[in-house]
Image (cartoon, rainbow, N blue to C red):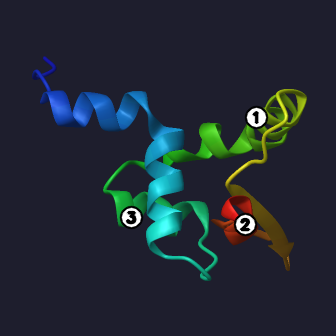
Amino acid sequence: MNMPISGDKFEKYKNSLVCITEFLEENKGVGFTVEEIAEGLGIEKEVIQPTLSFLPLIELLAMSKGRKLEIESVTIKNVIYYRYNEKYHK
């Protein structure tokens, strides 16, 4: 049987992209893997991974509205790292 969750936990899971962005912004200049982001947020990687896998689509939608995405990624040796895009606020 599942137990009820707190309102804070509900919001964290509901708005995972916002949580990820805030985490990366708090750690500007550092690239993190999905596992490291999940650990830093205290959220299962299975919640973080789908959100970040939609990043190209989210970026496309943001661009269509004249906005820039706050998260950027790079792949190094088959590992994807994400970081806060500091150029976003310039």
The answer to whether 23 is drawn above or below residue 61 in the figure is below
Q: Amino acid at mark 2?
A: Lys
Viewed as shown, does residue 7 lie left or right of 83?
Answer: left
Are discs 2 and 1 less than 8 Å apart at CB? Answer: no
Badge 2 is on which residue? 90
Which circle, 2 or 1, is nearer the viewer? 2
What residue do we see at 79% from left, 34% from top?
62
Going from the N terminus, do you reach mark 1 or mark 3 first? Answer: 3
What residue do we see at 61% from left, 38% from top?
51
Badge 3 is on which residue? 39
How far apart are the alpha carbons under marks 2 and 1? 20 Å
Q: Nearer the viewer, residue 53 or 11?
A: 11
Q: Nearer the viewer, residue 52 or 45?
A: 52
Residue 47 visible in image: no
Viewed as shown, does residue 28 lie left or right of 59?
Answer: left
Badge 1 is on which residue? 58
Q: Nearer the viewer, residue 36 or 56?
A: 56
Viewed as shown, does residue 3 lie left or right of 43?
Answer: left
Q: Nearer the viewer, residue 21 or 2?
A: 21
Label 1 Cα neighbours within 10 Å, binned few <14 / some 14-19 / many ≥20: some
Label 2 Cα neighbours within 10 Å, binned few <14 / some 14-19 / many ≥20: few
Query: Tag 3, which secondary structure?
Result: helix
Q: Amino acid at mark 3?
A: Glu
Q: Quadrant of residue 29?
A: bottom right
Going from the N terminus, do you reach mark 3 or mark 2 first? Answer: 3
Q: Which mark is residue 75?
A: none
How far apart are the alpha carbons under marks 3 and 2? 29 Å
Residue 6 visible in image: yes
Name the quadrant of the C terminus: bottom right
